[in-house]
Amino acid sequence: MKLLPVAMIGLGLVGMASIARGQQSSAPTCTTEMSQQACKQAELAKIDALLKQNDQASAKVAHAMADAEMAHASLALLRSYALAIQSAVTKNWVMPDGLPNAVCKVRVVQLPGGIVESAVADASCPFDDRGRRSVVNAVLRTQNLPYKGYESVFRRNIMLTFVPSGTPIAVSGTGL
């Protein structure tokens, strides 16, 4: 007799869950023609089905949370990568006098390992020839951009933005 109230509570949960989802349960419902044992088994089957759905939903939430944590960690590493490149290149920039207080972008292609393959001042760079050479040479003098520890966020093509007002250079690229 103690199982009957549990089965009745289960019926209430199944009914509420079905109403909340707007669905009908596919498990049989208790009728007056069913034996008490068959009714209990039907209700237990409904409860098992709901528990399985709950477990599946919990697994999806856990997976989504893990993905979000991984994305956050990746973003933090990407920011650290950009700062490491910025620091390495800024140390090698010998800024000539008389540069306009404007932005000059340099396209950089690097190989895995951080080896600089090429550096070219963007056509939109307002610096004179001496200023353009100074930003390109800053990248080429660096030779090896930071790589170790940043393999998972490495970008072959990056854009460095130089600003002569004492503001550090900025790094951008796919995902930076």
Image (cartoon, rainbow, N blue to C red):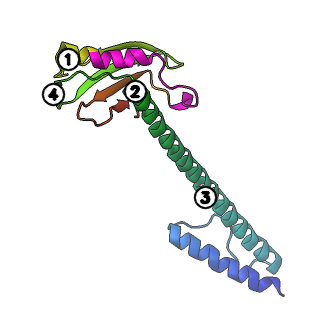
Which residue range is magenta in the image? 134-153
Relative to residue 38, is residue 118 drawn left or right?
left
Q: Mark 3 or mark 1: which comes first in sequence?
A: 3
Distance CA(mark 1)–CA(mark 2):
24 Å
Which numbered marker is on residue 100?
Answer: 4
Q: Position of residue 80 (x, y in %)?
A: 48, 38
Q: Which residue is at 63% across, 76% downward?
A: 13
Query: Disc 1 or disc 4, which is closer to the eye?
Result: 4
In terms of secondary structure, where does tag 1 sit?
loop
N-terminal of the pair, mark 1 or mark 4, is 4
Q: Contact, CB < 8 Å: mark 2 with mark 4?
A: no
User: Residue tagged by mark 2?
Assistant: 91
Q: Secondary structure at mark 2?
A: loop
Say if mark 1 contacts mark 4, CB within 8 Å.
no
Q: CA distance from mark 3 to mark 1?
A: 53 Å
| Residue identified by numbered label 3 | 57
The residue that mark 1 highlights is 123
